[in-house]
Amino acid sequence: MRIEKCYFCGGSVYPGHGVMFVRNDCKIFRFCTSKCHKNFKLKRNPRKTRWTKAYRRVSGKEMTVDKSLDFEKKRNRPVKYDRDLVNLTLKAMKRIQQIKERRESAYHKNRMVGVKANENKMKRQEIVDRIDIIRAPSALAKMKERIEKTKSKLGQLNTAMSS
Amino acid sequence: MGRYRGYGGTHTKNKQYKRARSTKNRAKDIDQIYNEIQPENIEKYTKIEIDPELPGMGQHFCIHCSKHYITDEALNTHFQTKTHKRRVKELKVKPYMGEHSYLPIDNGKKLRPTPADSTDTTTTTTTMDS
């Protein structure tokens, strides 16, 4: 018994779940759900489908290089039952999960650095560029000073980001 | 709520749709084609043999799209189409072969070492990482 990986989304395929497809060149494809199976039949590229593991890894949304990821491996040799070993493994699994979660959250935090500031900058830029849409021409003359202020602030932000 | 889930669907009466998606007409996957166009294999797959079952006796074949055409003219017009150009572009990079979905294999040390590799006989029984 083995928990396989879905070809399309990269999720786990538990025993008794999903579909297996064997192509006429003996290559095996496993799918966790009919959603993944259908997407495969449509010949979609998992690297370009936004919700798959493959996409997330390729585009740097998830941690890919880490020691804690190396534990999950395919082992083709059965291990002889040993009560102590099982206990130890179960203990280790919990600890590894803890470490992994912490590292993943750190990775996410690191990835999100500066996103908010950039968003604010973009909003400001949009207002400056499209001010004539939201304000009447007569009002624009009155608020000339404020527009100039926003512009100068944007310039500051741009220099701060580039430096 | 939702659509009526009785008999039929969008494509039940669409013969063309069914024919295109039948197993008989299943086209090659892009990773298979990618293997075929590799320099070591391309000679094998571009060999043209006369086959009366195929369109144009199987003489006008586009390897990138894995499709037979009836004449050379038809093949040449196909080469100028967008679908063909898109396919050629797609095949420039190695297609997805499930490398992210496969788990790496690690069997650790041998449980019962043969006399030939008796150099590491110290740890033989416990080979599970904790």
Image (cartoon, rainbow, N blue to C red):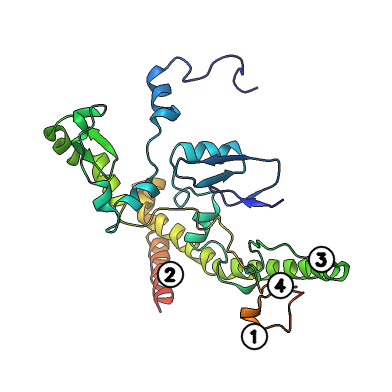
Residue B70 vs residue A69, the one in the foreground: B70
The residue at the far front in this view is B115
Mark 3 vs mark 4: tell me if same chain: no
Q: Residue A153: give its label.
A: 2
Query: Could you tell me if the residues under marks 2 and 1 are in contact, i.e. CB atoms within 8 Å?
Result: no
> On what subunit does the disc labeled 3 rest?
A
x and y, in percent, of residue B62 in the image: 23, 41
Label 4: how many residues lie within 10 Å, few (<14), some (14-19) or many (20+)?
few
The residue at the far right in this view is A83
x and y, in percent, of residue B67 in the image: 27, 36
The residue at the far left in this view is B73
> On what subunit does the disc labeled 1 rest?
B
x and y, in percent, of residue B8 in the image: 54, 15
Q: Nearer the viewer, mark 2 or mark 4?
A: 4
Q: Which residue is mark 3?
A: A90
Q: Which residue is mark 4?
A: B112
Q: Nearer the viewer, mark 3 or mark 1?
A: 1
Query: Could you tell me if the residues under marks 3 and 2 are in contact, i.e. CB atoms within 8 Å?
Result: no
Q: CA distance from mark 3 to mark 4?
A: 25 Å
Label 1: how many residues lie within 10 Å, few (<14), some (14-19) or many (20+)?
few
Q: Nearer the viewer, mark 2 or mark 1?
A: 1
Label 2: how many residues lie within 10 Å, few (<14), some (14-19) or many (20+)?
few
> On what subunit does the disc labeled 2 rest?
A
Residue drawn at (61%, 17%) of the image: B4
Question: Would you place residue A124 above or below residue A49 in this image?
Answer: below
Residue drawn at (56%, 62%) of the image: A62
Mark 2 vs mark 1: tell me if same chain: no
Question: Would you place residue A137 above or below residue B73 in this image?
Answer: below
Q: Amino acid at mark 2?
A: Lys
